[in-house]
Image (cartoon, rainbow, N blue to C red):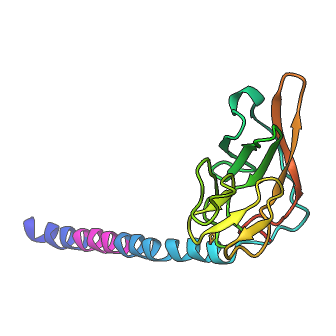
Amino acid sequence: MPSNDQPEKSSAAKLNRRDALKAAVLFGAAILFMPAERLAHFLFPPRPTGPITYPRQRIANTKDVPQGDSLLFEYPYEDHPSLLIHLPDGGFVAYDALCTHLGCQIHYNKDAVPGWENNPKQAFCPCHGGVFDPNTGKVLGGPPPRPQPKLKLEIDDQGEIFANGYEGGLPLFGEF
Ligand code: FES
């Protein structure tokens, strides 16, 4: 009976090959189109339908950040950097850490930025040399078109520092 089995086996093999080919084509299409969809989402992020709300979130304790130093933390979302600065005069301020120019991460400098040797304590963006006043977030130099968004801070009796939305400067880079 081998002659009767042969066509069945051959058609089963054809089906398997066809299924495997279909799966490969679908997999390839998924690989091709998924990045395009993600790219489209990045380039044209969906607009929020209502006002954006931001969480109240503990950042650190006042003892954790020495005067004249800073701390990077994530706010208002995971992986979104913000910068807490303990000013040389003793106050605390915090800013969104994505530069308003093209979204690079800003830093608070302990050492002078070239050209700012007389006033070394600045918030600085290394990508294109954006310099910000750490007291206000205003642009002091470079291409950033507007001040850094400034966070609203609350400090309780135990010295716990909380971020609770923004005082001004919104939108965040990449938001509307
Ligand atoms: S991204 Fe900050 S100065 Fe250009």
Q: How many labels does the image show?
A: 0
Give the percent coordinates (x, y) of residue 58.
Answer: 78, 35
Q: In this view, does 84 lie to the left or right of 129?
A: right
Quarter where residue 125 is shown: bottom right
Residue shown at the point (37%, 74%) measured from the top left: 22
- Looking at the rendered image, the quarter that the C terminus falls into is bottom right
Which is more toward the observer, 62 or 38?
Answer: 62
Give the percent coordinates (x, y) of residue 117.
Answer: 62, 58
Furthest-front residue in view? 118
Q: Give the range drawn in magenta.
A: 12-22
Q: In which quarter of the image is ligand 1?
A: bottom right
Residue shown at the point (81%, 34%) measured from the top left: 161
Which is more toward the observer, 138 or 111?
Answer: 111
On screen, 40 above or below 158? below
Q: Is residue 95 left or right of residue 33?
A: right
On screen, 115 above or below 84? below
**Does the magenta-highlighted stretch encompass residue 15?**
yes
Residue shown at the point (60%, 64%) measured from the top left: 104
Give the percent coordinates (x, y) of residue 35.
Answer: 50, 72
Magenta-colored segment: predominant secondary structure: helix
On screen, 79 above or below 146? above
- Looking at the rendered image, the quarter that the N terminus falls into is bottom left
Give the percent coordinates (x, y) of residue 89.
Answer: 81, 41
Furthest-top residue in view? 158
**Does the magenta-highlighted stretch encompass residue 125?**
no
Quarter where residue 18 is shown: bottom left
